[in-house]
Image: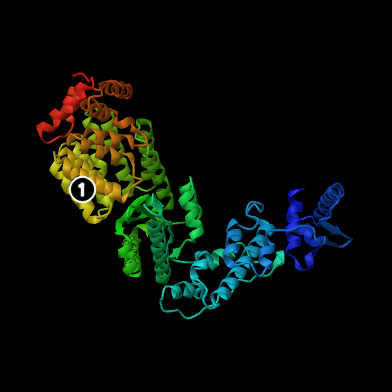
Amino acid sequence: MPRKALLLLARLRLSDGGAISRDDAADFLWTVDDHALALTNLRKMLSRVQTMQSELASAFVVADGRRLKLADGAFTSDLDAFDDTEVGASTLVELCDRGFLREACDGIGVIERWAESQRLRQLAIIRTRLLNAASVAGMDFLSLRKAAYFLLDRFPDDNEVRDLVTGAAGSPPSPPAKIELSVPAAPREAAPAALSRQAMSFAGPRVALLPPAGHPAADRDFNLSTALVDDVAICLCALRAFAMVAPYTAERIRGSHDKAGLLAKHDITYVIDTRLSQQSLVMQIIFVPSDSIIFAERYDISEANLAHSRRGLAEAISSTILSTLSRNEAARVDYELNPQAYRRYLMGVQQMNRLTLPSIRAARRTFRDTLKEREDFAFAYGGLARTFTSEWILTARGDTELLRKAEEAAIAAIAHGPEIASSHKELGRVRLYLGQLDESLEALENAERLSPHYADAISTHADTLVHASRPREGLEKIERAIALNPLGPDEYFWSAAGASFFLEDYETCIAYVQRMGDASCAYRLLAAALAMSGDKQKAHQYRRKDMQENPQFSLTQWLAVVPIRESWQKDLYREGLTKAGYEN
């Protein structure tokens, strides 16, 4: 069946009486100035359809001299659900979210405008069935939540639907304000594609609250945490400060391999990520434009706690989320004024995910390109500083010029963004490797003061404590960072491995390295731990792998520049590396 014939069937299916004139069909399918040419194209297409109908002994379209009509009983369609009053709103949401003819309209022209009018008509049907169902006594709100959030995602100012949500939460209702969603059905008079965006016009950010993930200790705990997240979503809807993304979309983001693509597609500014860990729920807020965690906390969700205070806990969490987003408002406004700089910065962040020299140097070029677009962009200066310190670690040659450039970039980051915790974190990191341990701890304390739940800053602080010969404090801090960000970068596990090594817990050190996605940067530490645990064969294997990555490595030179405060710690490290086969 020709593609345009399929579009014609869709048009006939949704037209009054299942029929339209030949003139309308020609103008609908072919956007050409020559109407006679469009009619000729229509005749040729109908001829092909007639041939197919003869071969199939089944009719789809009946054509006479002036009109085209859908044959009686021609086919069934998923659109039938919108005509069946017994089908509930939640079922229609699953159809509507796929987007009527989403991949068939090319986004322009008469067909797209008509398809958009049909999408709005479908939303109007969902809304009517939702409100009708909600008026039935004894109706369970949870069965309606998907449709309610789906509509609020598209129409944040729909007070009747919002009152349905907040009413379920026991919140006072708002004055009803009905939103008119109906549009003319005729293609020439159909609402423009921008109509739905106008209906969605909303000044605040869009927020995706992801459903809990993790490994639940028991189904009951998982159900309790899910119920708590539902309560938080209801409270956030009541606040009206921003638009909540529908749960169906949030679930797709949670399970997607292309989260960044979906976040961009749905114009999401904040992600609230939730994860279940034993009897606690870890919640963190990610500012998508800079890929930075601006809040993280762990909440007790034991059955005893939730049974008595679930509603109060949900309200407290919602209040915390709102205050966090309010503090980040300047960054959001800045992003909206400079979106291209943020996008380029994110490219650099993604390149930094792999701790290899090619990836780090590619990220450095990207951050420099970002600064060409916007020379006062603090996040890009911080990223630039990170590339220099990371290269200093990986090359292990004690190149002071790399650290000088890193310090210069970190100071610029603070100058342009003194309130940004990551800027202070990068300064603390570079001063660690300069051997200025007290100055490093001071900068990292500033970072944690600005953002007490910033897992990356906590991780770097932990690393500095280890180098300051306080490995037990460092391990406690890095374990807190891992708890706040369980799927954090490899550096977390690398720092935890280092702390465990200096506590002479070599098995734990090895286990942390094995949790890294790409452990190549930690082969030297792994070799030392294996040697100290007695497995010299494996230790020598990883020493060889490390030397392939860094053939110019010198044990004496590295121990001379690696910042370690007390001699016992450096002696222990030297012993492990020597047993692994490293030579002076």
Q: Which residue is mark 1?
A: 444
Mark 1: which amino acid?
Leu
Q: Position of residue 535 (x, y in %)?
A: 26, 24
Which residue is at a point 17% across and 40% down the rendered structure image? 471
Residue sitting nearer the eye, 36 or 520: 520
Q: Is residue 556 visible?
A: yes
For this orientation, the residue located farthest to the bottom is 175
Q: As drawn, is 457 to the left or to the right of 288? A: left
Q: Position of residue 26 (x, y in %)?
A: 79, 57
Q: As drawn, is 192 to the left or to the right of 582? A: right
For this orientation, the residue located farthest to the left is 567
Q: As drawn, is 188 to the left or to the right of 399? A: right
Residue 123 sits in which quadrant?
Answer: bottom right
Q: Position of residue 335 (x, y in %)?
A: 39, 55
Please tell me whether residue 151 is drawn above or below residue 428 in the rendered image: below
Q: As drawn, is 28 to the left or to the right of 198? A: right
Which residue is at a point 25% across and 40% down the rendered structure image? 496
Q: Quadrant of the C terminus?
A: top left
Residue 499 sits in which quadrant?
Answer: top left
**Residue density around tag 1, few if under 14, some if 14–19, many if 20 or more, within 10 Å:** many
